[in-house]
Image (cartoon, grey):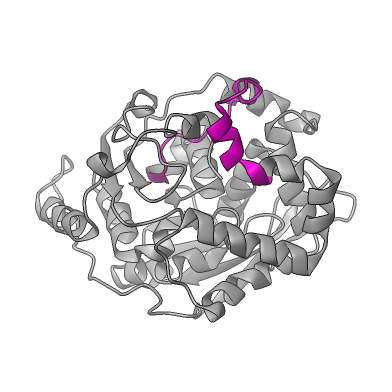
Amino acid sequence: MINRRTFSKAVGLGTGAAAISLAGLQSQASAASAAHRAGGTSAATVPDVSPGAHTSFPTLKHVKAGVLDVGYAEAGPAHGPVVICLHGWPYDIHSFIDVAPLLADLGYRVIVPYLRGHGSTRFLSQSTPRTAEQSAIALDIIALMDALKIHKAVLAGFDWGSRTADIIAALWPERVKSLVSTSGYLITDRKMQLTPATPAVEHNWWYQWYFATDRGKQAMEDVEDRIALCRYVWTLVSPNWDFDDATFQRTAEAFKNPDYAAIVLFNYRWRIGLVDGQRRYDRYEALLAAQPPIHVPTVTLDAALDPFTAPGDGSGYRTHFTGPYEHRTIADIGHNLPQEAPTVFAQAVVDADHL
């Protein structure tokens, strides 16, 4: 989930005034796509597709990258411009089940990896600590790009995926052609996380505090309990998403990874200072603590029904993005934006690529 301090800005304030309808956004996106961008090229208009139109990826692959054997989906031409789509928690690659074919049909090579601890991604060594610092996950994706000989890509994500993409764009901008970041700037400042928020904010982070307890640890380490918890989170953060059992179960398979509990527990405990990260990541975390700006072309997306979306049309994080920039707020959509509104998300990718 997103940064607790960003979320605190949303409490007690409505998002409706800042939101536009999904149909309205699609019309705006189409109009923007028809216009010529600064680079002299025009962006394609993504065809509309109903969420849930696809149920599986045509190709699932593996590659050894850094400390991981990464499982990933791939779609589109092998030599097309690359888009890497990054999922969050508690989700998996199926968040992009409809986005990937939309982009592939436009000629993009789409890579959708399982993050560490998810799905078919595995650690190469039993001795590797099962940690999940924000920079560790970003370095996993850099290693994946190196293994696949991808020098530069469009990065697009939400939740953990937005944070990971933001970090790569901030620390390794030469690897990022452009960025789509749902919920804006999500690089975590651990020192700031230690400051108490308002009671309503703390209440909404119930699962983070639950994971800090032995009871939460036991629940995450029990497969059935963790899957029930994840499903409950889906209903809270995407109140308008009428997903069916089959949709959830396809993603829930990713939660059966043997390292899933360790990775999720570490990530949330590390953010609030309950556990220390590996020293090998300290230098990166020191850079991230300074909240570095992002200079690459960026489109930020806010889902109006996501309880973690702050009001203000992205104004709370606008200064972090110093390059070509667009912001869009989408009405009637919750936290899992790419799966709930795949056409909108895919259009943002295409438009970011042409900023």
Residue 97 lies, in percent from the top left, at 45, 71
Query: Is 111 in front, or is 185?
Result: 185
Residue 180 lies, in percent from the top left, at 38, 47
| Residue at horizontal 60 percent and vertical 57 percent from the top | 90
As drawn, 154 above or below 199: below
Query: Is 181 in front, or is 332?
Result: 332
Residue 306 lies, in percent from the top left, at 43, 49
| Residue at horizontal 37 percent and vertical 27 percent from the top | 316
Give the quadrant of the N terminus: top right
Q: Is residue 293 left or right of residue 234?
A: left
Query: Is 349 in front, or is 331?
Result: 331
- Asked if residue 139 shows in the view, the reply is no
Residue 200 position by quadrant: top right
Count of numbered labels shown in the rendering = 0
Q: Is residue 350 left or right of residue 336?
A: left
Q: Is residue 131 left or right of residue 143?
A: right
Residue 24 lies, in percent from the top left, at 16, 56
Residue 244 included in the magenta stretch of the image: no
Report the span colored magenta: 179-207
| Residue at horizontal 60 percent and vertical 42 percent from the top | 138
| Residue at horizontal 63 percent and vertical 38 percent from the top | 134
Q: Is residue 219 left or right of residue 313?
A: right
Query: Is 212 in front, or is 133?
Result: 212
As drawn, 164 above or below 235: above
Give the quadrant of the C terminus: top left
- Asked if residue 28 shows in the view, the reply is yes
Residue 204 included in the magenta stretch of the image: yes
